[in-house]
């Protein structure tokens, strides 16, 4: 029976990968664009983002430079007091469509339309 490689991933590798994914999405880069800038395949970026493969120090430096972020931010050390919250937000934004939904939400007028959208999404959870 084949083993699930994600089941063996180290929690630090998973957290670093989640931060890479979050910063990549915030910067509007595709996995392919990040891979080209870092000199690897997009499949390798996928593995880094899942935490399935560890990111070497030199690769982490290249990725951080491409994402215009300090390497320490990949470990949550830029502001340790909020690291747990950032990890939670990164996990939520890693869900397919989450960042796009948040961007669309931010374009809605404050008040009624935003509240209506939140109510609608909550109603889907109950359905």
Image (cartoon, rainbow, N blue to C red):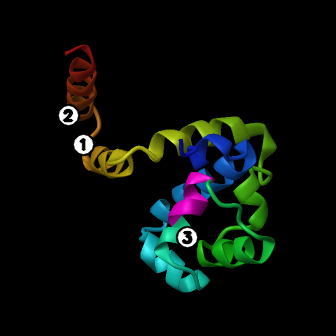
Cα distance between the residues tagged 1 and 2 = 6 Å
User: Where 71 falls versus 73 (above or below)?
Assistant: below
If you read the primary sequence from the N terminus, does the residue marked by circle 3 or circle 2 appear first? 3
Q: Which residue is mark 2?
A: 113
**What label does residue 44 carry, if any?**
3
Classify residue 87 by image quadrant. top right
Q: Residue at x 64, y 74 (%)?
A: 63
* Horizontal and vertical percent position of residue 34: 52, 76
Q: Can residue 9 be seen by looking at this rendering?
A: yes
* Horizontal and vertical percent position of residue 72: 79, 60
Please tell me how crowded label 3 is: few (under 14), some (14-19), or many (20+) other residues with Cα within 10 Å.
Answer: some
Give the foreground label among 3 and 1. Answer: 3
Say whether marks 1 and 2 touch (CB < 8 Å). yes
**What label does residue 109 carry, if any?**
1
| Quarter in which the C terminus is drawn | top left
Q: Secondary structure at mark 1?
A: loop
User: Where 61 falls versus 74 (above or below)?
Assistant: below
- Main SS of the magenta part reads helix
Residue 43: say if magenta.
Answer: no
27 sits to left or right of 84: left
Which residues are drawn in magenta?
A: 46-51
User: Where 121 falls versus 81 (above or below)?
Assistant: above
46 sits to left or right of 120: right
Q: Secondary structure at mark 2?
A: helix
* Horizontal and vertical percent position of residue 113: 20, 34
Cα distance between the residues tagged 3 and 2 = 40 Å
6 vs 55, nearest the viewer: 6
């Amino acid at each position: 029976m084949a083993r699930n490689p994600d089941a063996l991933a180290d929690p630090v590798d998973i957290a670093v990968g989640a931060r890479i994914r979050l910063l990549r999405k915030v910067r509007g880069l595709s996995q392919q664009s990040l891979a080209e800038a870092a000199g690897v395949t997009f499949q390798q970026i996928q593995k880094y983002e899942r935490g399935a493969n560890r990111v070497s120090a030199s690769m982490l430096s290249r990725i951080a430079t491409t994402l215009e972020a300090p390497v320490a931010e990949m470990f949550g050390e830029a502001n340790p007091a909020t690291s747990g919250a950032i990890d939670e937000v990164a996990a939520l934004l890693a869900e397919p469509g989450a960042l796009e939904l948040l961007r669309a939400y931010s374009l809605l007028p404050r008040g009624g339309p935003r509240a209506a959208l939140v109510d609608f999404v909550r109603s889907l959870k109950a359905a």
